[in-house]
């Protein structure tokens, strides 16, 4: 699976659990860590945990296992490393504090439509 297709799959999965304000960054030209960062929020620690558990289950069904998962027990900031995509799921106030969007301001955003959950440009 191409990295963009995998990133869009992850985006669709987090949207199944009503993740808030997802942003998909193309970071491959800026770092060797990953090709894409997916940043999203939950409205509570429980929602953050539910989103991350759903991602783990659905990605396993698709044949992907994470290289690592951090922060799931606390539910403030869950980081999920799938190699070419790193998923950051925040409790909303924690997302504002760390401001990853500001840190990666130079990274192009992948545009998508929430209604059809596919890349539009």
Image: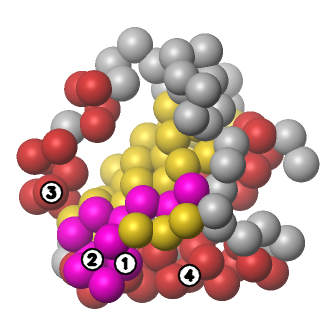
Q: Is residue 38 found left or right of 105 in the rendered image?
A: right
Residue annotated with mark 4: 54
Quote the CA–CA distance across marks 4 and 2: 13 Å
Residue annotated with mark 1: 72
First of labels 4, 1 by sequence position: 4
For the residues labelled 1 and 2, say whether their Cβ atoms are less than 8 Å apart.
Answer: yes
Residue 78: within the magenta?
A: yes
Q: Position of residue 88 (x, y in %)?
A: 41, 54
First of labels 2, 3 by sequence position: 2
Q: Residue at x 47, y 75 (%)?
A: 52
Q: Is residue 32 found left or right of 78 in the rendered image?
A: right
Q: Nearer the viewer, mark 4 or mark 1?
A: 1
Q: Residue at x 75, y 78 (%)?
A: 60
Relative height, residue 40 to residue 15 (above, below): above
Mark 4 secondary-structure assignment: helix
**Stretch in magenta:** 71-81
Q: Position of residue 89 (x, y in %)?
A: 37, 61
Quote the CA–CA distance across marks 4 and 1: 12 Å
Residue 108: within the magenta?
A: no
Q: Is residue 84 found left or right of 2 in the rendered image?
A: left
Q: Residue at x 28, y 37 (%)?
A: 100
Mark 2 surroundings within 10 Å by alpha-carbon count, few (fewer than 14), some (14 through 19), many (20 or more):
many
Residue annotated with mark 3: 94
Quote the CA–CA distance across marks 1 and 2: 5 Å
For the residues labelled 4 and 3, say whether their Cβ atoms are less than 8 Å apart.
Answer: no
Q: Which mark is residue 17?
A: none
First of labels 4, 3 by sequence position: 4
Residue annotated with mark 2: 75
First of labels 3, 1 by sequence position: 1
Q: Residue at x 20, y 51 (%)?
A: 95
Q: Is residue 5 visible?
A: yes
């Amino acid at each position: 699976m191409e990295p963009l297709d995998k990133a869009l799959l992850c985006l669709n999965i987090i949207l199944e659990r009503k993740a808030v304000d997802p942003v998909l960054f193309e970071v491959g030209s800026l770092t060797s860590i990953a090709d894409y960062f997916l940043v999203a929020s939950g409205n509570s620690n429980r929602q953050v945990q539910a989103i991350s558990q759903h991602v783990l289950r659905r990605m396993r069904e698709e044949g992907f296992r994470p290289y690592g998962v951090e922060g799931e027990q606390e539910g403030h900031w869950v980081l999920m490393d799938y190699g070419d995509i790193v998923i950051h799921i925040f409790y909303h106030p924690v997302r504002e504090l760390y401001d990853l969007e500001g840190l990666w301001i130079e990274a192009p955003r992948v545009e998508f439509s929430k209604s059809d959950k596919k890349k539009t440009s």
